[in-house]
Image (spheres, rainbow, N blue to C red):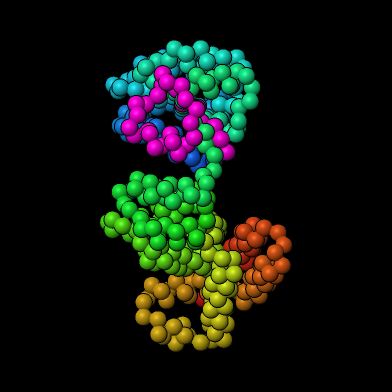
């Protein structure tokens, strides 16, 4: 096996055209690239139907020793051309484990692909350096700014689509340079555009508005129903999708003001049919009444106090706003919601 120390971008550039190596070692600070590289090797080595019997994912030290990993790598594939042994947290192995793998790497099985993934940025000990020299060593460090457009083009291409230069730069401006965040946005765009072959700037604007509008609507529904599990997940989602805290807080406050107004009118004796006369959808009317009945008028006062605290923390920049938002959601859904039978 040709020994090589290579940066991630070069590794991906040659992966499709080169033969698979028998022994890979992934190191470096960019976790997303390491995971992407592992997936690319597995995809090339094993068709999906062959993975259940020929892909083993192990954790160093807790699952398997270096000697055991070597022995497993010598096992023949089952009804397939190759086996893949993936060992995560390989940096936790002791010197004896590494030496066992070093002996294997010098005379590897030609029908097995061994992949070691290290959580450490650099493996400094001499035994690790020796193993790295015997492996196809892929170093995964954060991409430079001028490398990210090419990465986006390739990621979009993995979905069978293309992206215009204008759309690519708009995506970077809106999302930043985090590969994980960019990957999430690419996946959303691909799903949103369906069969459209080219992603354009207008698609990014339309998808962002559609996704965020739906997500904040779902968050308000979950809060109105006092559905804690759904609300917690949706708080994370709207933040991940790029909504600013002030937008989230404003939308939630607006929703509760509307529910409070409805609750007050119902308590004053007005009939629901009169209040919601312009709401033609019977399902929407039932949902609105149900949400108004989730909270008493005193509970609404406490909810508005919580939202006011969030607003003050947001303006002063004190603490972790997302955590405070989650705590407010917890209080709203668990402390302030009333039993369903309390109101009519």
Position of 142 with respect to 51 (left or right) is: right
Q: Is 3 a magenta residue? A: yes
Out of 122 and 331, give the one closest to the viewer: 122
Instruction: Judge whether residue 230 can be spotted in this image.
Output: no
Position of 265 with respect to 190 (left or right) is: right
- Locate residue 223, reporting x and y percent: 54, 65
At x 34%, y 34%, the residue is 16
Instruction: Judge whether residue 144 can be spotted in this image.
Output: yes
Q: Is 303 a magenta residue? A: no
Out of 211 and 124, give the one closest to the viewer: 124
Tally of marks: 0
Out of 97 and 340, give the one closest to the viewer: 97
At x 54%, y 43%, the residue is 142
- Locate residue 279, reporting x and y percent: 40, 81
At x 41%, y 85%, the residue is 277
Q: Magenta stretch?
A: 1-29
- Locate residue 107, reporting x and y percent: 44, 12
Above/below status of 243 relative to 117: below
Position of 120 with respect to 68 (left or right) is: right
């Amino acid at each position: 096996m040709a020994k090589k120390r290579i940066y991630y971008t070069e590794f991906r550039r040659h992966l499709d055209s080169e033969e698979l190596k028998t022994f890979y070692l992934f190191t470096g600070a960019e976790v997303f690239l390491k995971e992407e590289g592992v997936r690319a090797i597995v995809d090339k080595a094993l068709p999906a139907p062959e993975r259940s019997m020929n892909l083993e994912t192990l954790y160093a030290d807790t699952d398997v020793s270096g000697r055991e990993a070597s022995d497993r790598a010598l096992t023949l594939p089952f009804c397939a051309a190759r086996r893949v042994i993936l060992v995560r947290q390989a940096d936790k192995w002791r010197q004896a484990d590494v030496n066992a793998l070093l002996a294997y790497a010098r005379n590897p099985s030609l029908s097995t692909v061994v992949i070691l993934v290290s959580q450490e940025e650099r493996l400094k000990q001499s035994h690790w350096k020796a193993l790295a020299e015997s492996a196809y060593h892929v170093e995964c460090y954060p991409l430079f700014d001028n490398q990210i457009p090419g990465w986006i083009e390739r990621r979009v291409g993995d979905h069978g689509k293309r992206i215009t230069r204008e759309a690519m730069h708009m995506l970077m401006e809106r999302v930043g340079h985090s590969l994980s965040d960019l990957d999430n946005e690419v996946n959303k765009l691909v799903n949103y555009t369906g069969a459209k072959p080219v992603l354009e700037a207008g698609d990014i604007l339309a998808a962002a508005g559609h996704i965020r509008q739906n997500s904040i609507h779902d968050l308000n529904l979950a809060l109105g129903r006092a559905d804690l599990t759904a609300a917690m997940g949706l708080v994370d989602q709207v933040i991940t999708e790029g909504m600013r805290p002030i937008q989230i807080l404003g939308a939630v406050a607006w929703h509760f003001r509307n529910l409070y107004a409805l609750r007050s009118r119902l308590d004053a004796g007005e009939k629901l049919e009169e209040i919601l006369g312009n709401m033609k959808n019977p399902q929407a009317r039932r949902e609105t009444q149900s949400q108004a009945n989730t909270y008493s008028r005193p509970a609404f006062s406490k909810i508005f106090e919580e939202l006011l605290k969030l607003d003050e923390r947001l303006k002063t920049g004190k603490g972790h706003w997302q955590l405070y938002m989650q705590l407010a959601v917890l209080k709203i859904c668990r402390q302030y919601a009333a039993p369903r039978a309390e109101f009519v």
